[in-house]
Image (tube, helix red, strand yellow):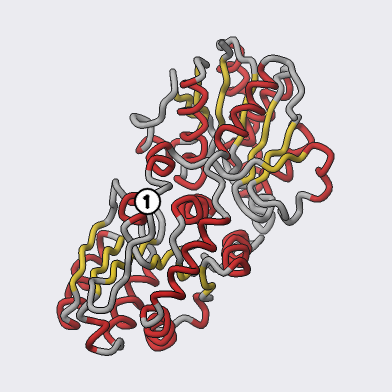
Amino acid sequence: MSTIVLMAGGTGGHLFPAMALAQELRRRGHVIHLMTDHRATGYGDRFPAEQTHIVPSATPSVRDPVKFVLAGTKIVWGIGIALGKLSGIKVDAVVGFGGYPVYPPFVAASLIGLPGVLHEQNAVLGRSNRALAKRARVLALSFAKTLKAEPFADKSLLVGNPVRDRVRAIADTPYPALVAGDPIQILVTGGSQGARVFSDIVPAAVAELPADLRGRLRITQQCRPEDLDRVAESYRQAEINVELAAFFDDLPERMAQSHLVICRSGASTVAELTVIGRPAVLVPLPGSIDADQKNNALFVDAAGGGWVAEQATLSPHSLGTRLAALLSDPAGLQRAAAAAKSLGQPDAVEKLADVAEALASKGKPK
């Protein structure tokens, strides 16, 4: 039995794969601790760890010298806090899942000689992971072609992006039959807090669909709390059957029941889509320095498992036109579902657990 500390930023994109690994390592008899930032408090009671340790961190801003110095001071403080916490636990190995909250504890682990794995969920190696890669024994990748990871090829392994147990449990759910006249299930989700662009555009887009298609729609949409009333009114005026909520705890199950998903292309979303095998209109989050979501989406699009829709050019008319074409072609949706499924890596968590175990036992990962 080993003690392994997982380190992750406090958002679902980082915490969900960490949670998947924690579940697998606990099944194997290991003791798990989590180091993260204050944003993870909403997941704390569900994360399978012996203890959750909050470590101060910050994101440096090179454009503002004052903020840069303040962030640097907080990071150094976080390293000191992490050193104290790690010294109080008999740790065998650490696994980092990216984001600047991982920087202080991962640096602290390397300073005291603990072997570490860095996992990259996206198709582009993130800035924090790039800064930490030289301190890692292994760089675990989710995509065979990961941009900016080329300098670390000698320590890179392809493992995939772990998904939670509840996702793996429904991975073999068949794509729902789509027969003429039957209801069409569409899931719209923008991440843990919803995406305002979907609240603005999707109701108007589906309102433009032909009446025969519109009457068959059964839409499940995640919205920000402040958008719920106006989105409900938009759907009511269009006479469309919809279920709205700020958060769906059973999102993977709803994804499995869907004929089409409209969503962002964060790493965890793409991993779950491909493990379950559902086609999607992917709207990458704009403004990212490394365009990680766009590269994730392009990977799915290139395989025929989904369609990239850039937010800058997305409108009710353009989305409505695309939806009309997709929903009128059940065979095409079925092919896209199979293509998405072919990209899935449901065994990613076992592969990553093998790597963590090997380091914890002072072995060499294969």
Identify residue type, mark 1.
Thr
Q: Can you say whether 309 is above or below 361 in the image?
A: below
Q: Dividing the image into 4 quarters, which one contains the N terminus?
A: top right
Q: Name the residue at 52% across, 43% down.
A: 346
- How many marks the image carries: the answer is 1
* Residue 226 x %, y %: 25, 63
Closer to us: 191 or 2: 2
Q: Name the residue at 76% across, 54% down.
A: 148
Residue 351, located in which quarter of the rendered image?
top right
Whether residue 77 is visible: no
* Residue 345 x %, y %: 56, 46
Whether residue 89 is visible: yes
Q: Which residue is mark 1?
A: 173
User: Label 1: few (<14), some or many (≥20) within 10 Å?
Assistant: few
Q: Secondary structure at mark 1?
A: loop
Residue 244, located in which quarter of the rendered image?
bottom left
Q: Can you say whether 340 is above or below 155 in the image?
A: below
Closer to us: 78 or 319: 319
* Residue 326 x %, y %: 42, 79
* Residue 196 x %, y %: 37, 68
Q: Dividing the image into 4 quarters, which one contains the C terminus?
A: top right
Closer to us: 275 or 51: 275
Q: Name the residue at 29% across, 47% down.
A: 250
Side of 187 relative to 319 (left or right): left
Q: Name the residue at 35% across, 55% down.
A: 256
